[in-house]
Amino acid sequence: MNDFVIDVHDLRKSFGANIVVNRLNLQVESGEICGFLGANGSGKTTTIRMLCGLLSPDSGSGTCLGFDLMREPHRIRREVGYMTQRFSFYDDLTVAETLEFVASVYLLQDPRGTVAGIISRMELTPYADRLAGQLSGGWKQRLALAACVLHQPKLLLLDEPTAGVDAAARREFWDLIHDMASEGLTVLVSTHYMDEAERCKRIVYLSDGHIVTQGAPDDVRRAANLIVFEASGRGIDEAARALRRAPGVESAAVFGSTLRVAGTDREALSRTIAAHPQLAWQEVEPRLEDVFIHLLAERAA
C-alpha cells in the first residue's frame, strides 16, 4: 500500500449516453482534509459513491484504503464512513437507538460502550432520548456524523454534509472534522460553501466529470491569475449592471456597499473601471468564490 488513502486513475462512469465522470485521477494522502468542489452535475457525488463502493466504475483502476476499487468494493464499504447530504436514518428512533442500530450493523464488540463514547464526544448527551426526527438540521447532521465514525473508519466521505445548516452549526461541524483529522482520519468532503473550502488542506475542482484545478486554497487562487478590483460609492448597483457587459470584465457583483469586478486582462479591466470615476477603486486579493466563478465562465465559454 502506498501513502495514499485514495489513489485512483482514469475513472469513468456513464449513465446511458451521459458521461458523468470522465477519466478522473485523484490521490488523497492520509490525514488530509480534501475539499471536492464543482457545479451541480460536475460528478462529485458519483465519484464519492464509486470511492465508497456503492457504484462500480465503467473503467479505470485504483485503490481506496488499499482495497481494489473494482474487485473489493464490499471491503471498502465496511471500512469507510459515508455521509450523504440528506439525513438518511429513521426519524422514529431516538439518537441512542439510531447509534445502537448502526453498531449492530457493524457487529461492534462493545456496542453500548462505543455508543456511549460517541454520544459524549459529539455532545449528543442532552438529546440521547430524543427522536431523530425531532432534531434540528444541525443536530441531525451531528448525529449522522456520529453514525459514520462509530466503527472508527480511516476514511470519511462527506457529500455536502452541511447543506441547509446554519453558520454556527456548520462551524461546529467543521471543528469536529478537524479534531478527527488531527487524530489521523482522512476526509474527502464536497461543499458549495467557500468558507468551508478555505478550511481544507487541499481543494479539487471538478467540471464535466474531470479535475480542472487542484491544490492548497492559496495556490489555486494564485494559479487563476485573476485580477480583482473593489469599489465603493454612490450608484454601485447601476455600475454593476453596466460593467457586466464591459470589455475585460468576467464578473461584477455587489456585496453590501461594495462592488467587486474581476477579469484576467489587466489592461482592459483597468480601462473599463476608469470609465467609472465616481467610484473609489482599489485592487484586492481574489477570493475563492471569484476563482470558481471564473472557472465556471471558462468552462461555459
Image (tube, helix red, strand yellow):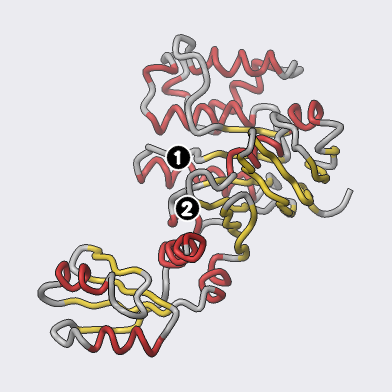
* Cα distance in 3D space between marks 2 and 1: 10 Å
Q: Residue at x 51, y 71 (%)?
A: 221
Residue 123 seen by the camera: no
What residue sits 58% from the left and 51% below the top? 208
Crowd band around label 1 with a 10 angstrom C-alpha radius: few (<14), some (14–19), many (20+) = many
Q: Position of residue 53 (x, y in %)?
A: 73, 31
> Camera-side residue: 243 or 50?
243
Judge by depth and name the residue closer to the eye, 59 or 134. Answer: 59
Image coords of residue 227 (percent x, y): 41, 80
Q: Which residue is mark 2?
A: 196
Disc 1 designates what residue? Answer: 162
Q: Is residue 200 left or right of residue 74?
A: left
> Between 29 and 100, which is closer to the camera in this rendering?
29
Q: Is residue 108 shown above or below 76? A: above
Q: Earlier along the polypeptide chain: callout 2 or callout 1?
A: 1
- Residue at image position (66%, 23%) is 114
Q: Quadrant of residue 119?
A: top right
